[in-house]
Image: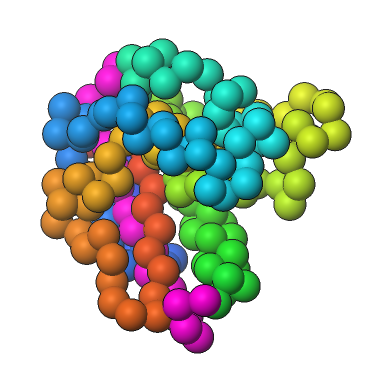
Amino acid sequence: MKNWRELIDAAVSIGAKKASLISVEDISFEPAFRNACIQNSCGMYGRCWMCPPDVGPVDELISRAKQYRYALVFQTVFPLEDSYDIEGMLAAGKRHNNLLQTLCDQMKGESFLCLTCGACGVCDSCAKVEGIPCRFPEKSTASLEAYGIDVSQLARACEMNYMNGVNTVTYFGAFLFDNLQ
């Protein structure tokens, strides 16, 4: 297993603005944060295996997350042309998920739960819309909000800014695990 300090350093070296290690006990879980998913503001509700309702009931997901002891939380911050730069936000989300997958690859063989921002970004189009099973269940990721995590409180607990200025977009990801080296 890689030393968790090395993973924090690796996250920053490949593009995270910050990374931090906290206890899962310090994470605020609230089923109401799942409402962002239910309101379908991202357009993925019912269109992705890792999004609600298919990812599972929020109470079960919270219980699953609380079985872990630690969380490696990281944030990425990307510049935008302006606050309406949807293409820039989507490209930043893809870069964030690429960073997440790179870190996942470094953690092979470990037991962990990987959570990200928004819908799973492993495939360009989720197999759910084609009515077939997930193509990459070992790489798929659910969102922090789907697990009822208050991301703004998570940022504060990790001494990170939830927002990082005008014409930027900030995304968060987390790895929940038990063994700390």
Q: Position of residue 84 (x, y in %)?
A: 52, 76
State whether residue 57 is above or below residue 39.
above
> In which image quadrant can residue 52 be found?
top right
4 relative position to 175: left or right: left
Nearest the viewer among 106 and 117 is: 117
Q: Residue placed at 35% from the left, 35% from the top?
A: 33
* Residue nearer the viewer, 39 or 12: 39
Q: Is residue 3 magenta?
A: no
Type of colouring = rainbow
Q: Quadrant of the C terminus?
A: top left
Q: Residue at x 62, y 46 (%)?
A: 43
Residue 111 percent coordinates (x, y): 42, 25
Q: Is residue 30 visible?
A: yes
Q: Nearer the viewer, residue 9 or 70?
A: 70
Give the magenta part as a residue range: 66-84
Q: Is residue 116 left or right of residue 16?
A: right
Looking at the picture, how far across and down is residue 172, in whole percent? 37, 53
Vertical comparison of 23 with 66: above or below: below
Residue depicted at x 61% and y 23%: 54
Where residue 136 sits, quadrant-wise, is top right
- In the picture provided, is 90 more to the left or to the right than 161? right
160 horizontally vs 142: left or right: left
